[in-house]
């Protein structure tokens, strides 16, 4: 891994106000990736490729990442960054709206990282559950949205986002087939797995 190049990509993203994954959030995800090396990863929200490049370090040798970005300019920058890191074989970018692209996918993924339009999280969840392998894991970033999600005061323009993030939390925590942790790292990280069905004797 070309660490110096990765640092440059990170610094430029921060300078350009691109909301890349926060360090403590990344540490939590990487911890879990070390336990179960994912073979296929799906990311919703590439931006300039920073998080996908970070995840690629913990992929299985045969592993691949599909990532979706609707902003053409960002996707082009992501392509450039991925090429500079020699990861073109590992990371594939779909350019377009995830709302349209997700329903066309039919592979199973061991890890899904949701990090795009907050108002679409319930839709992304439905698609993620359809695409998740039995032992897979779903991470949803920004799930606590600067604390708005857990506070009563929501007379903000963020109201729709907050409503949808709450819906995501409700659906993942109340569904008896799922196991969800909400971690207070970064802007909030939801970690969801399918409950194992092994009967206990
Ligand atoms: N995962 C990146 C940061 C993503 S920022 C990292 O940590 O490095 C969120 C990105 O999601 C933005 O670039 C935005 O353009 C994209 N996005 C938002 N809604 C989307 C949608 N519906 N489909 C595809 N991309 C979307
Ligand atoms: Mg984010």
Image (cartoon, rainbow, N blue to C red):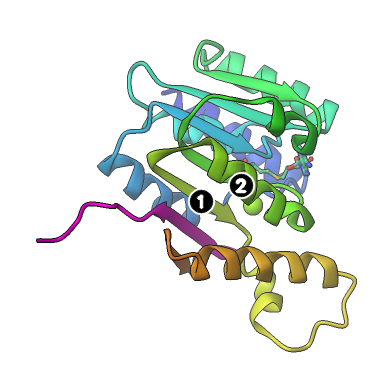
Ligand 1 occupies quarter: top right
Q: Which numbered disc flags the more N-terminal residue, 1 or 2?
A: 2
Quadrant, the C terminus: bottom left
In the rendered structure, does residue 186 fall within the stretch colored magenta?
A: yes
In the rendered structure, does residue 66 fall within the stretch colored magenta?
A: no
Quadrant, the N terminus: top left
**Location of mark 2 (residue):** 114
In magenta, the rendered stretch is 185-201
**Residue 36, image x, y percentages:** 29, 39
**Residue 48 position (above or below residue 165):** above
Q: Nearer the viewer, residue 145 or 106?
A: 106
Name the disc covering residue 126, or none.
Answer: none
**Residue 126 position (above or below residue 61):** below
- Crowding at dot 1, Cα within 10 Å, few <14 / some 14-19 / many 20+, comes out as many
**Location of mark 1 (residue):** 139
Q: Residue furthest left?
A: 201
Q: Are marks 1 and 2 in contact (CB under 8 Å)?
A: yes
| Residue 82 appears anywhere in the view | yes
Q: CA distance from mark 1 to mark 2?
A: 6 Å
């Amino acid at each position: 891994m070309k660490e110096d190049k990765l640092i440059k990509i990170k610094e430029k993203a921060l300078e350009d106000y691109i909301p890349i994954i926060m360090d403590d959030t990344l540490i939590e995800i990487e911890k879990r990736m070390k336990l179960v090396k994912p073979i296929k990863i799906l990311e919703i929200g590439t931006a300039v490729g920073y998080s996908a490049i970070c995840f690629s370090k913990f992929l299985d040798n045969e592993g691949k990442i599909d990532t979706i970005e609707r902003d053409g300019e960002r996707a082009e920058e992501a392509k450039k960054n991925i090429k500079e890191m020699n990861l073109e074989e590992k990371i594939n970018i779909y350019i377009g709206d995830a709302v349209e692209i997700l329903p066309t996918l039919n592979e199973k993924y061991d890890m899904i990282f949701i990090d795009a339009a907050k108002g679409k999280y319930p839709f992304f969840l439905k698609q993620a559950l359809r695409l998740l392998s039995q032992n897979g894991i779903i991470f949803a970033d920004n799930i606590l949205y600067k604390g708005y999600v857990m506070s009563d005061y929501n007379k903000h323009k963020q109201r729709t986002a907050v409503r949808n993030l709450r819906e995501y939390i409700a659906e993942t925590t109340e569904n008896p087939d799922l196991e969800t942790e909400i971690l207070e790292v970064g802007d909030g990280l939801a970690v969801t797995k399918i409950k194992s069905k092994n009967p206990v004797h």
